[in-house]
Image: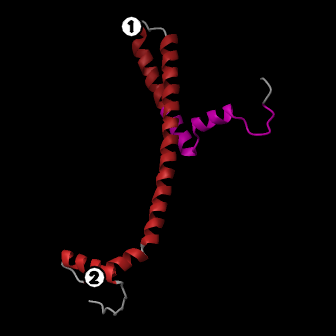
């Protein structure tokens, strides 16, 4: 057990009475209460800094989640529009063409997955490309109609 050093503290009568009452109620030494109060006083700034850091981190996470929610909403809407257009424009196949169409569909799907993998590996993102198409770079003089 580490050696403790002595500290003399002068309290007014009312504060001393409150300290003695608390020590009796808690069945603990007055010096233990004093030590806890000093520790609390000395670490108050640390607690405030920690709380501020946590608050900043939560704010960053909230903004990140908001961006993800926006991007997901964009993706779902784009997919829904594509599916609606595809279902509207694609005529049903005759029964004798079903097997060939399914084989071609599997081939196209595999090609799609490979292309998707390449894009993701390169860091290309459709959302970024769409945003760049919608918002041209500053100074490009694109205020005119196409």
- Image quadrant holding the C terminus, namely top right
Q: Which residues are magenta?
A: 113-142
Q: Position of residue 76 (x, y in %)?
A: 48, 29
In which quarter of the view is residue 4 placed?
A: bottom left
36 or 120: nearer the eye?
A: 36
* Mark 2: few/some/many CA within 10 Å (<14, 14-19, 20+): few
Mark 1 or 2, nearer chain start: 2
Q: Position of residue 54 (x, y in %)?
A: 45, 59
* Residue lying at 30% horizontally and 93% vertically, measured from the top left: 3
Determine whether, in the image, residue 130 is placed left or right of residue 63: right
Q: Is residue 60 above or below residue 119?
A: below
| Residue matched to label 1 | 95
19 or 127: nearer the eye?
A: 19
Query: Is residue 120 located in the magenta-colored stretch of the structure?
Result: yes
Q: Position of residue 78 (x, y in %)?
A: 53, 26
Magenta stretch, main secondary structure class? helix
* Mark 1: few/some/many CA within 10 Å (<14, 14-19, 20+): few
> Looking at the rendered structure, which numbered label has been put on residue 32?
2
Secondary structure under tag 2 reads helix
* Residue lying at 48% horizontally and 8% vertically, measured from the top left: 91
Determine whether, in the image, residue 57 is placed left or right of residue 135: left
Question: Marks 1 and 2, Cα distance to the nearest angstrom?
Answer: 88 Å
């Amino acid at each position: 057990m580490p050696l403790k050093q002595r500290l003399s503290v002068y309290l007014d009568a009312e504060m001393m009475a409150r300290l003695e009452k608390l020590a009796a109620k808690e069945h603990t030494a007055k010096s233990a209460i004093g030590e806890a109060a000093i520790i609390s006083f000395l670490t108050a700034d640390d607690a405030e800094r920690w709380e501020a850091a946590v608050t900043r981190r939560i704010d960053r996470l909230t903004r990140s989640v908001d961006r993800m929610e926006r991007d997901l909403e964009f993706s779902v809407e784009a997919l829904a529009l594509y599916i609606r257009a595809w279902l509207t424009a694609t005529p049903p196949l005759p029964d004798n063409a079903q097997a060939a169409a399914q084989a071609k569909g599997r081939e196209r799907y595999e090609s799609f997955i490979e292309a998707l993998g390449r894009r993701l590996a390169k860091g290309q993102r459709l959302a970024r490309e769409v945003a760049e198409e919608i918002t041209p770079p500053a100074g490009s003089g694109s205020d005119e109609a196409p």
